[in-house]
């Protein structure tokens, strides 16, 4: 029988808060001035608490006895965090401690994530425009680069996109980052937003194995995807850069399965992928390997739940809040692996510690540190129904 005893020590809630605040304090330099009423740790404590709680800075400060003034915190965020300042720290903040936990070889995923913008049409500077989605064509857009290790996802980098940025722009930057890491890249998994001639050319030039879902642009590929069974075909895309035009050729694996009434549908489901990876030789393998990247969507759901609530359109603060939401996931995975998992022969044993519990622990620690109110005023004493 397995013992329930995991280790000789414990990590308490307040220590989790300390770890996150220290991480920010070590990477983020805040010169608040000699006359400032608060210090950097006060700001970081509020940022961590609001991130874990998924609430706004104003709301958290207003209901906390020991929190600094929301106006003070927001003033320093507005004056000390411009885009350059946030962009200069985001990679080191996310990668701190993380890289040492990664194995020698990893799979990486690049993704585009669009958060719809519904604000004033005259206040859209710095937004990203794309095809209509969720009733708008304007978005706060971010590209993220993840390492995927045995279904665990670690964010390596995040980039903000604005109008005029292209998928190939951000992919070129991400592929450059990958070449400087010590781990080997088994394959790069991209979402359909990266399916174009420039991105496929970049992958070939950098000599990375890759899988990218195919978009049916043109009559030829539409015809191929409408008929037949699982197979491999040769395909190409023509693209241009300035006055130059070139054609990139690549194999496409088409995987076909019967729907068999799934989601109320019947017939044949066809999935197609641009694939150049030595470990993929059959169409079903392409779909199986690519399906693993859908775990990334879970990261976004977690990120949405741990994102500071704000109405600001300031791109620096919005980017900072996104980085914090991804950082908090990285820290959970790092601590889970390094401190909670039990080393044993054949690999570590990951004891049960879900992200939701981690977030609850950080939230409670922040509430305690900031003295969030645990009672509300009442115009008369509670009666017997409030007691047991």
Image (spheres, rainbow, N blue to C red):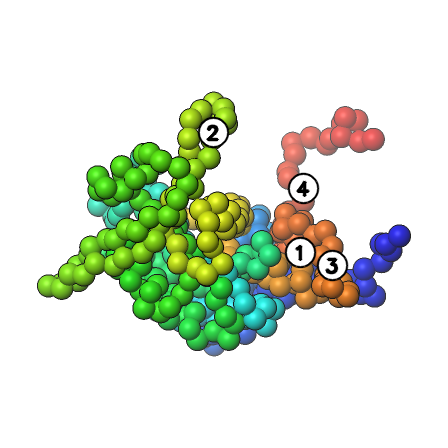
Label 1 vs label 4: CA separation?
A: 17 Å
- Please, is residue 122 above or below residue 65 in the view? above
User: CA separation, marks 3 and 4?
Assistant: 41 Å
Crowding at dot 1, Cα within 10 Å, few <14 / some 14-19 / many 20+, comes out as many
- Give the x, y percent position of residue 136: 29, 38
Q: Are marks 3 and 4 in contact (CB under 8 Å)?
A: no
Q: Quadrant of residue 189?
A: bottom left
> Which residue in the protein does label 4 denote?
375
- Label 1 belongs to which residue? 365
| Secondary structure at numbered mark 3 | loop
Residue 243 image position (x, y, % from top left): 10, 63
Task: Identify the image quadrant of the C terminus.
Answer: top right
Q: CA distance from mark 4 to mark 2?
A: 55 Å
Question: Marks 3 and 1: in contact by CB < 8 Å?
Answer: no
- Secondary structure of the residue carrying numbered label 1: helix
Q: Position of residue 125 (x, y in %)?
A: 24, 53
User: Between disc 4 and disc 2, whose residue precedes?
Assistant: 2
Q: Residue at x 87, y 55 (%)?
A: 3
Identify the residue at image location x=44%, y=46%.
Answer: 283
Residue visible at 29% across and 62% down?
201
First reached walking from the N terminus: tag 1 or tag 3: 3
Q: Is 53 placed left or right of 380 in the picture?
A: left
**Mark number, residue 259:** 2
Q: Is residue 108 left or right of residue 19?
A: left
Q: Earlier in the sequence, mark 1 or mark 4?
A: 1
Task: Find disc 3 in the rendering and name its residue.
Answer: 349
N-terminal of the pair, mark 3 or mark 2, is 2
């Amino acid at each position: 029988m397995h013992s329930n005893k995991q280790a000789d020590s414990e990590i308490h809630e307040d220590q989790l808060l300390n770890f996150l605040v220290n991480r920010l304090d070590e990477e983020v330099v805040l010169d608040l001035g000699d006359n400032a009423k608060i210090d950097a740790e006060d700001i970081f404590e509020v940022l961590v608490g609001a991130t874990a709680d998924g609430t706004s800075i104003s709301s958290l400060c207003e209901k906390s006895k020991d929190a600094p003034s929301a106006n003070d915190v927001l003033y320093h965020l507005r004056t000390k965090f411009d885009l350059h300042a946030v962009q200069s720290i985001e990679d080191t903040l996310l990668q701190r401690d993380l890289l040492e936990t990664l194995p020698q070889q990893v799979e990486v995923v690049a993704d585009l994530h669009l958060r719809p913008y519904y604000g004033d049409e005259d206040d859209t500077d710095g937004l990203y425009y794309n095809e209509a989605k969720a009733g708008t064509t304007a978005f706060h857009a971010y590209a993220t680069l993840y390492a995927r290790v045995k279904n665990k996802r670690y964010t390596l980098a995040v980039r903000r996109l604005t109008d005029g940025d292209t998928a190939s722009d951000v992919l070129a930057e991400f592929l450059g980052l990958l070449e400087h890491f010590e781990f080997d890249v088994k394959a790069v998994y991209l979402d359909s937003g990266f399916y174009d001639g420039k991105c496929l050319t970049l992958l070939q030039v950098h000599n990375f194995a890759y899988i990218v879902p195919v978009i049916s642009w043109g009559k030829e590929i539409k015809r191929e995807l409408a008929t037949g069974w699982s197979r491999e075909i040769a395909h190409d895309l023509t693209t241009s850069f300035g006055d130059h035009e070139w054609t990139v050729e690549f194999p496409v694996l088409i995987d076909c399965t019967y729907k068999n009434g799934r989601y109320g549908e019947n017939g044949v489901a066809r999935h197609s992928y641009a694939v150049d990876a030595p470990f993929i030789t059959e169409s079903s393998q392409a779909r199986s390997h690519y399906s693993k990247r859908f775990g990334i969507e879970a990261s976004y759901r977690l990120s949405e739940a741990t994102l500071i609530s704000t109405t600001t359109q300031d791109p620096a603060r919005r980017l900072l809040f996104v980085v914090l939401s991804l950082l908090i996931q990285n820290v959970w995975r790092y601590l889970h692996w390094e401190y909670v998992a039990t080393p044993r022969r054949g690999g570590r044993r990951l004891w049960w510690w879900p992200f939701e519990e981690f977030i609850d622990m950080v939230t409670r620690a922040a509430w305690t540190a900031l003295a969030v109110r645990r009672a509300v005023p009442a115009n008369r004493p509670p009666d017997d129904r409030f007691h047991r």
